Amino acid sequence: MDRRNTTDLPIQKRKTVSFVDYRLRAFIVVGAVSLVAAFGFLAFSRGSNAQGSSSCIGCHSGLEGALSDPVKSFEHDIHKAKGLSCNDCHGGNPAAFDKAAAKDRMWGYVGRPTEEQIPAFCGKCHSDAELMKKFNPSLRVDQVIEYFTSIHGSRLRRGDKNVATCVSCHGVHGIRAPSDPLSSVYPLNVAETCAKCHANAEHMAGYGIPHDQFDKYKSSVHAKALYEKHDLSAPTCNDCHGNHGAVPPGLASVGNVCGQCHARQAELFQKSPHKTAFEKINAGECLTCHGNHAILAPTDKMIGVGSGSICISCHNNDAGFAAAARIGKGLGELQASIDGAKDILERAERSGMEVSRPKFEIADAVDGLTQARVLLHSSNADEVEKALGPAMEVAAKSHAAGTAAFEELSFRRAGLAVSLVFILLLALLVYLKVRQIEHRPPFAL
Amino acid sequence: MINKDALLQWFDERLGLEPIIAVARKKEVPLHRHSVWYYFGGMTLFLFSVQVVTGILLLLYYRPSADNAFESVQFMITEVQFGWLIRSVHSWSANLLILALFIHMFSVYFMSAYRAPREATWVTGVMLLFISIGFGFSGYLLPWNELAFFATKVGTEIAGVVPLVGRPMLRFLRGGDDVTGATLTRFFGFHVAVLPAISTVLIGLHIWLVQAHGMSVPPGIEGEKSAAKMKFIPNFLLRDLIGWILAVGVLAALAAIFPWELGTKADAFAPAPAGIKPEWYFLFMFQTLKYLPAKIFVFDGEVLGILAFGAGAAFWMLVPFLNRAPVHARRKLVFNTIGIFVVLFIAIMTVVGFLT
């Protein structure tokens, strides 16, 4: 480059910068800057990748009370974790910081949906198989369809705004995955979520159904398994009623519901005379004896013809009564036999006798009793007695082992007494011999 | 009817028993106010022979592997006729044997019966003490129950703490790094073969030495010319026999009224039962180690404790050489005080161990 200053050059050699060149340069610079700015804007305006600068969050986080709550709850939302933001559900322009521009209908702004609109609002994505595949291929996409088969869905269609919609159970902005222990639909939390409405007397007024199901459920053996033993396979509301298609099971199909877990009992019941009998009198299959919500641990008192028996609420001097009597008696006898055997074996062990084998073997009798308690659902006394027979033999054998242990103990004690007599006698004889050979009365030594 | 003398002569011609019989005929036991303690040596020997007899009977049914040991003991005490009796007698007699051994040892100590020329008798006796404790430790594991398993684990762990030789000793005892079936086999070998062989030699030596030197008389009584004497055969021996017969009665009563527990089968993966304790004759050491602080100056408390017990055992064995005759009143006082301290220490720490 010519380092010489152009002003040093003779006038003729100076390069003149034409007006056109100057404007061309300016135009190129401005254009480049605009392009960069435009790209920048475009990049920022892709709301899905730019939550940080989303105008929704930006504005609403600065507001007070209920208007800023969504921002706070959304922090833990599963949709946020998957890279979604406000506009993905509500529409609008997250790049515009002007309220009107942000909520522009041209940008698909829906705002806050009404109760009737909620299923479709969520279903916009959750019923779209192609879309959901990208996020979680194993997730179902029929929730909305199921929902409209439910009591909640059908009532919503008829204009009842009081019923549960998606957000009633799942939450609105802080929605967590059902597998998240903090989720309102995690197994340990489901009953409470349903109870929010179903245990509320005011809310449930006019529907003609009780509102004590939650209280009853809490007293049940299922609730004990779930809340105390943390057995997540124990049923809660949705396991019997369904999730999205929640309805109370029909009386004839209760057995199928309980039979999901209690398969053997359900199978036996379906083949029993109670199946058609219950249908005739419109009695619920399992719940007639066991209840529906307050299902307590069954006791042997429930069967038979004694006080506390459920059989006698229908049966009186008929074949059913006779069968119930046989079954109740059999179960009672076996339980008593097992208890007696366990008692005598415990006492024998405390007395120092070795009875660990009979104690172990009595478990077979307990198994037999359990089997009998399942078989009674067939209402067939012969079948039950078939299971009771071998169990009674085992219990009797164990009891005999306990008795034998005590006999052995007595034998040992008697043997000891006799031996001690001989031993002391022998010692005395030796002592007398000492006296004899020493020809003198005995001293201590 | 065979003539007794003729029979004796028949054996003597073939076995040369006459010198032994002469010694036995001549043996005398001094009679004085401390003579009662003379019975405890014989009692220890009697209880040892009870162990041998019951042990041989147990050997007929016992199976020394981790899979079978517990079940074989269970079979013995439930199915074998009088198996319960033999097993309980064996376990109780082991404890009574150690007790009799302690009484015998301390009575010898306080009567200074280890004085020259009986130093070797004392040394063989202390070695028999260690062998007997070895019998107790190895035998305890054999039923392969929970308590035994963890007691062995803890006991060998403590042995492993000794500096330098501890780790190799632990691996030798356990037959590996952990207590396993290999440990059981090894302990069985010690219990029925190695230790019996060694103790046969030592007991033989010990008894021969006692016969060779005769019964010791305590220093205070030594000078008394009027010391009465009793012939060993038949007088003292018959009295011994009364004691042994009564011991059999005590063992029978203990076996019938307080049968030895079978326990639950050992499970290497189960945690140690809470408050696990060794047998009573180890308890004083165990309790002492528990009380020692983790660190004494720069040294590990446990290591120092074990070394101290080792030093104590060495001192104990060397007592005859440290308390040589002629004994002055002051040295006698020192050694008596040491003896009383040891007895009290063992007694108190054992009781504390049981109560805590």
Image: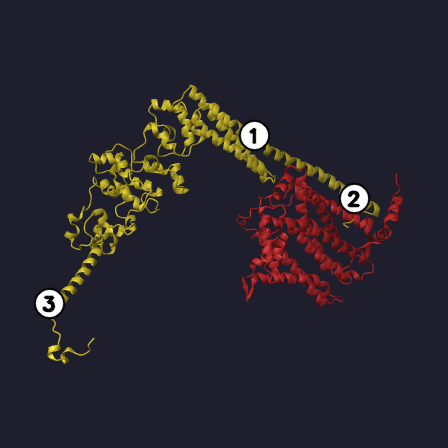
Chain colours: A yellow, B red
- The numbered dot on residue B74 is none
- Residue at (48, 26) in percent of width and height: A384
> Which residue in the protein does label 1 denote?
A396
The quarter of the image holding the N terminus of chain B is: top right
Name the secondary structure under disc 3.
helix
Name the secondary structure under disc 2.
helix
Residue A309 in view here: no
Q: Which amino acid does label 3 sit on?
A: Val
Horizontally, residue A75 falls left or right of residue A19, namely: right
> Which residue in the protein does label 2 denote?
A430
Q: What residue type is labelled 1?
A: Ala
Return the residue found at the far front: A12
Identify the mark nearer the N-term, 1 or 3. Answer: 3
Q: Which of A380 and B221 is in front in this view?
A: A380
Chain letter of the residue beneath label 3 in the structure image: A
Q: In which quarter of the image is residue A229?
A: top left
Disc 2: CA contacts within 10 A as few (<14), some (14-19) or many (>=20):
some
- Residue at (64, 51) in percent of width and height: B137
